[in-house]
Image (spheres, grey):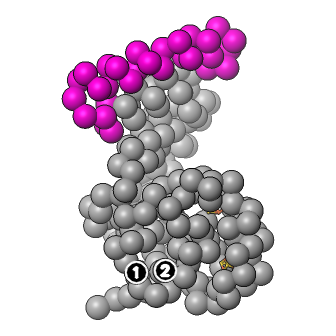
Amino acid sequence: MKTLAQEVIEAGGGESIKACYQCGTCTGGCPTAGEMDYTPRQIIRMVNLGMRDRVLTSNSIWLCASCYQCQVRCPRGVRITDIMAALRSIAIRDGITPARPRAPAFYQSFLENISTYGRQFEPMLILKTVVRSREGIGEKLGFLLGMLPMGITLMRSRKMPLKAERVQGIEEVRRLFTNAEKLEAEG
Ligand code: SF4
Ligand code: SF4
């Protein structure tokens, strides 16, 4: 049976994971580490120790903002950002529910918007995430109504668009998604 580290390496980007010497530089610069249940340094260690369930159900892999701070600073060349992405792919592939199920709903909605518009359209992002991740019509509506005042303020101050706009060359963006889906299907 494959170890989690082997799976990460196969998914791409994890080749240098064993080189980690636990200096903590990655965690020190991570903007979302404070919200994670395990810091990036801990995640790397846990992958190397084969702690599959804890890693794949952690919120850390979903709270990674893919900012690449850790990756560019790692003195051992560990590609932490790519490893986080690989861990998310493995979790999705294996149908593993994370500690915070809203994070995957946000990711899925985010990517759908990029595929549709070539850019983000926040009202749709919020709507899709809420519909996917909240239980029951009452909770969905309650949350959306609670967000309404902030949404109106953002729209009035032109910080959030009312109308979705597609980027030029959206066909190129869609081609990227199609190619990525093909690669994924090929394993
Ligand atoms: S910065 Fe690199 S070597 Fe240091 S703990 Fe993070 S992954 Fe390991
Ligand atoms: S890429 Fe992810 S783990 Fe690395 S610093 Fe940014 S948010 Fe943190």
Do labels 2 and 1 touch, CB within 8 Å? yes
Q: Residues within 10 Å of mark 1 (few under 14, many from 20)?
A: some
Q: Tell me the distance, in whole angstroms, between the alpha carbons under discs 2 and 1.
A: 5 Å
Could you say where residue 132 lies in the image, as x and y percent from the top left?
A: 31, 37
Q: Which residues are magenta?
A: 131-160
Q: Residue at x 56, y 22 (%)?
A: 165
Question: In this figure, which residue is indicated by the disc labeled 2?
Answer: 46
Does the magenta portion include 151?
yes
Name which residue lies at 62% across and 30% down. Answer: 168
In which image quadrant can residue 94 be found? bottom left
Question: Badge 1 is on which residue?
Answer: 51
Q: Mark 2 or mark 1: name the one nearer the start of the chain.
A: 2
Q: Residues within 10 Å of mark 2 (few under 14, many from 20)?
A: some
Q: Does residue 73 show up magenta in the picture? A: no
Using residue 186 as the reference point, say whether residue 164 is left or right of it.
Answer: right
Residue 24, percent from left and from top: 70, 75
